[in-house]
Image (spheres, rainbow, N blue to C red):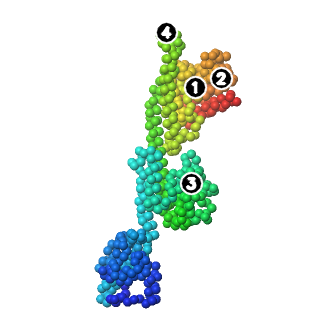
Amino acid sequence: MNDVFMPVMPEQPQSPHNFEKNILENIPAALVLTDLEQNIIWCNQKFCEWGGIDNPAGKKFFTVLGRPAMRGPDFVPFSKVRRTGLPSVTVLEIKYSGKFLQMEVGPVFNAEEKVTRYVVTLHDVTNQTIKEEKWIRLREVCKELADLSKKDILQRSPKDRTNILRAKIAKYTQEILKFSAVEVRVKSERDNNLLEPLFTFGMAEEARLRNLYVSQDGNGITGWVAFHGKSYKMDDSSEDPFFIEGAAGARSSLTVPLLHRGSVIGTFDVESTQPNAFDDTDLELLETFADNVAGAIHTLELLSVEQKETAFRSIEKVFTDSIGPLNLILNETARLPIDEIREHPEVLNFDDIVTSFTRVRDYARQIQNAFQGHIATLTTDLPPELSSTDCNNYPMLRGRRILIADGDESVGKELSRLLFYYGSTVEASTTGYGALKMLETTHYDAFMSDIKLPDMSAFSFFRKVRCIYCKRFQNRPLFTICEPPENDPSCPSSAMGFVPFLYMRSFGYDSGHVTIRATQAGVPKPIFKPFILTQLLDSLKMVILKAEQQQQQKRS
């Protein structure tokens, strides 16, 4: 009712004329006249219908409506009208029917301008109220999804975090949005065009197992929405060429994109067995909810990445601390005096000692491989902005074993740390002799040496490495004698012209002219210390790929 005084009426109401009665009976609202004790004096047919009674005259107003709950804004409407003479507005919740009625109570005055009657109008605001309450609850839900924080889920596994999100989606879509068939898909890490189910309920098993791709053709409405990044409201499946049934007997659906920073990361689909089951408000609600679901998915992925980054750094720290001891083990086992032990079989069991030393060496390498396995798993899942380096640019380095000879122990540790990220295992010795002994028992994919070694000429070291590598390349026993001998400049034979060997040097004078002699022997330009990472990586990439090409040519 408008905030105005009602016209004066006599103490006893008179029956309205037929024309007026026809109007009052057919207005799209319930109309009631009560006395000051809220006893019904007269009502139209709409009120009888909503009250579920044929003749409510003489009965209490609220009793006829089943004592509804008062939702406000006025909670004592009749008392307010009697006290102030002004109209009052409130919303009633009719529990037995599930309706929400907006009630407007106005005064009826006598000649002395005293309130003697109440005139009440009731309007059905069920749909409007339910939608408003959905919006209010949805805002709370969206805040809860946005508050998926580290303190709540950081300690959980990625699977547990995904299950938490699934549970929340199920709860909110059923309790608040009242959707009974839901499917959420996200782009696959394996194939960015594949939409994998993250969560479904109410959908057919066949639909859940169906492969859907980001495409505007042949992949249903889901593929279309993911391709265009736009929402799609389907009113009748019998008239829609894109529709592929998800829920059994589905007749209508809503499908919206999951967007993060403007990019599609998945889709959110709901279906109903009724045609035209969804209106524009349902679409707005779902889009709002989907935006927050997309944010939660992104948050969970970031938390997963953060956990991987933490694990990555932990492994890096442990590995860095282990580099020195592991290299010492490998150096010591390589220096095993096999010939001396062989000459005294009566004192020691030669085979047992060799077996023990071999096992020690193998155990050290198992530790190295374990580190590499963990780091390989984590590195592939880390985005470039979180990983210390972009490891994907140098896949040829993964799984490689590199031998280092340098009198400075820190050089081997630094190279181990740098190349660790790329999947390469570095084994180092502080002497040329130690490195050669390691080469006799282990295959290496590349070799690096300082241009000054403490126990031999760096160029002599290269020639010995070249000789051993040549014999391995030609499948010849290491103890065989080369023809021509290994100190002849023409060695190795023409069958093997390239050795994956790099020299390292600091800035300064090369007194032994190692660089010149090495270049003449086919060794690439040296890399300088301290290392420039891209130069180091590109140089290793070049020698490894060139050596592989040489091996392939030999096999063919």
Question: Which numbered disc, 3 or 1, marks the residue that appears first in the sequence?
Answer: 3
Which label is found at residue 346?
Answer: 4
Residue 443: numbered disc: 1
Instruction: Check disc 2 and report the residue beneath it.
Output: 474
165 in relation to 362, above or below: below
Q: Position of residue 56 (x, y in %)?
A: 37, 80
Q: Earlier in the sequence, mark 4 or mark 2?
A: 4
| Marked residue nearer the N-terminal end (4 or 3) | 3
Q: Is residue 64 left or right of residue 531?
A: left
Q: Quadrant of the C terminus?
A: top right
- Alpha carbon of mark 2 to alpha carbon of mark 1: how far? 14 Å
> Which residue is rendered at x = 44% and y = 51% of the image?
164
- The numbered dot on residue 207 is 3
Extreme residue in the right direction: 556
Q: Quadrant of residue 469?
A: top right
Q: Residue at x 40, y 76 (%)?
A: 51
Mark 1, secondary structure of its residue: loop
**Residue at mark 4 to residue at mark 1: CA–CA distance:** 33 Å
Q: Are marks 4 and 2 in contact (CB under 8 Å)?
A: no
Marks 2 and 3, how far apart at CA:
58 Å
Dot 2 or dot 3, earlier in sequence: 3
The amino acid at mark 2 is: Gln
> Which kind of residue does numbered mark 1 sit on?
His
In the image, 432 versus 360, the foreground residue is 360
